[in-house]
Image: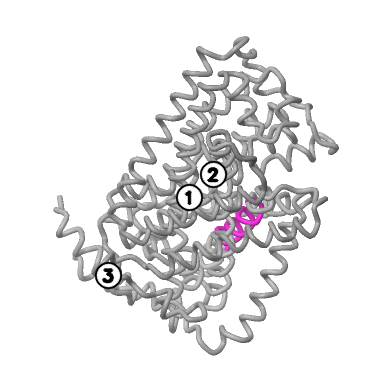
Amino acid sequence: MKNKDQQLLEDKKHLNRYGYAQELLRDMGGFSNFAISFSIISILTGAVSLYGHGLTYGGPGMMGFGWTIVAFFVLLIAASLAELASAIPTAGALYHWAAALKGIRIGWYTAWINLIGQIGIVAGIDYSCALFADPLLASVFGYSSTDTTILIVFGVILLLHGILNHVGIKIVAKLNDFSAWYHMGVVAILVVSLAFFTKNGLQPVDYLFKVGQTFSDQPYFLAFLIGLLQAQWTFTGYDASAHTIEETVHPRVRAPWGIYNSVAFSFVFGFIMLAFVTLSIHDASGAVNSDNAFIFVISKALGGTFGSIVLWLVTLAMFFCGLSSITSFSRMMYAFSRDKGMPFSRHWAEISRKYRTPAKAIWLSVILSFALALIDYITKLMNPDAGYSTIAFLTAVSVVGLYVAYGIPIYLKLRAEAKGIFLPKHYGPWNLGKWSKPINILSLLWIIFISIVMMIPPNQMAAYALAGMFILLIIMDLGYYKKHFKGPQAALEKSIDEIRRLEDEFEKEEN
């Protein structure tokens, strides 16, 4: 069995084979790698902040059936991505895989689509935290919670996340480890509290699977599909384990398990939590008509003071979630800029000498995320009768952006296998074997389906935003890509052929 120094040397040599130096501090263990994805998924953020959305459109059945259906397909997607992470273990992840499997142009587009999704997920997570924190702070300090105060709190949260990520990966890794246990602990507190102290008791279990009830003006089937945003947005960001792969010890095994297990554990803990929250509802109509359905349900079930304590615990979990998402976003941006994929790349690829973190990429992540929410805020000032919520807009942008970026390398891998370019020997130690192809195909079908669903009314603003961003990408393609972007180091000449050569060399050296 290898000691840590031997493993670090092997990890460094393997990264060098892809043309990259070991610049980031490689200090994350398997649990830390899992913890960052588990914290970004954060069932106490996605499932909670969009609880009212799910309940409004799909009724209680959304929590029983919707959550389970989405989790099943996301587990397939996570397995597909984990397989690629094991095969090509670099921080560029999605875009590097795409470039190696097809070519640098598709890699460039994958990176930018992923960046768009990352902006959406960071903004959505920290805005969710602000949506919970601001009313709680308002009750303490005696001011009225408004869209403006929520935006201010959102900015402060982003600022704190930027500072913590700037200071160093060791601190963030420890906080991520704590966050994973904290999420499990808060879910346990919430479940036990609702199980034993809910006023008027719990509903029968079959209430959790009650279908046919919607509080929207849509037919139930369509409303149910729209409500899937709650679960689908929760299960995003698990590619963080791949983006931190160059900071993980023994990454070809630990990072894939981090991706897959983060989804699996989130499904189990999330289902248990949603079950008890939903079974504690005695006024579903009042919940969907309130400012925040989750706060309404918890306050009614547990009372004012006890309910407020639980809500503070949930808000802190959201804070940890946002912290992890900035870590992932900045690492992806660093890796992309390292290959000169962005304007002013030399700045975003710069590593802080003192903290060994991509400091400028961290702060650009903060600025872009705030800008997305600010644009929505200004839009609503100009159109106060807008029929969508800010959180639905931000989350829909992140779901479509991220899942399209997830789907591109999965499709390209299937294509490379069909052409005999990507062979079984090119898989990493973590792979799906004979199940790889059917799992990849099912993953792609779900990505196509859910991306369409996430852009139909009332989420059409997400479609407009994404269309605008795609037009901007085409302009950047013409103005920047052709002149500056040469692609990932391992994809400079022969793409996957180069990967194969490097892998063969590494294998011979090991033997």
Q: Amino acid at mark 3?
A: Gln
Q: Are marks 2 and 1 in contact (CB under 8 Å)?
A: yes
Is residue 206 on the magenta stretch? Answer: no
Which badge, 2 or 3, is on the more N-terminal residue? 3
Label ID, residue 22: 3
Q: Amino acid at mark 1?
A: Gly
Count neighbours of disc 3 (C-alpha within 10 A) and say few if under 14, some if 14 to 19, many if 20 or more: some
Could you tell me which residue is drawn at 78 percent across and 31 percent down? 214
Instruction: Report the quarter where the C terminus lies.
Output: bottom left
Q: Secondary structure at mark 1?
A: helix
Q: Amino acid at mark 2?
A: Cys
Residue 100, given in percent of the width and then of the height, sits at 46, 72
Instruction: Kindly report the secondary structure that dominates the magenta region of the rendered protein.
Output: helix
Q: Residue furthest front?
A: 142
Is residue 402 on the magenta stretch? Answer: yes
Residue indicated by mark 1: 322
Residue 33, given in percent of the width and then of the height, sits at 35, 50
Q: CA distance from mark 2 to mark 3?
A: 34 Å
Does 477 sit above or below residue 56? below
Residue 141, given in percent of the width and then of the height, sits at 54, 37
Does 503 sit above or below residue 288? below
Residue indicated by mark 2: 129
Q: Residue furthest bottom?
A: 483
From the image, state whether disc 2 or disc 1 is nearer to you.
Answer: 2
Residue 329 visible to an observer of this rendering: yes
The magenta-colored residue range is 395-408
Residue 438 visible to an observer of this rendering: no
Could you tell me which residue is drawn at 25 percent across and 56 percent down? 27
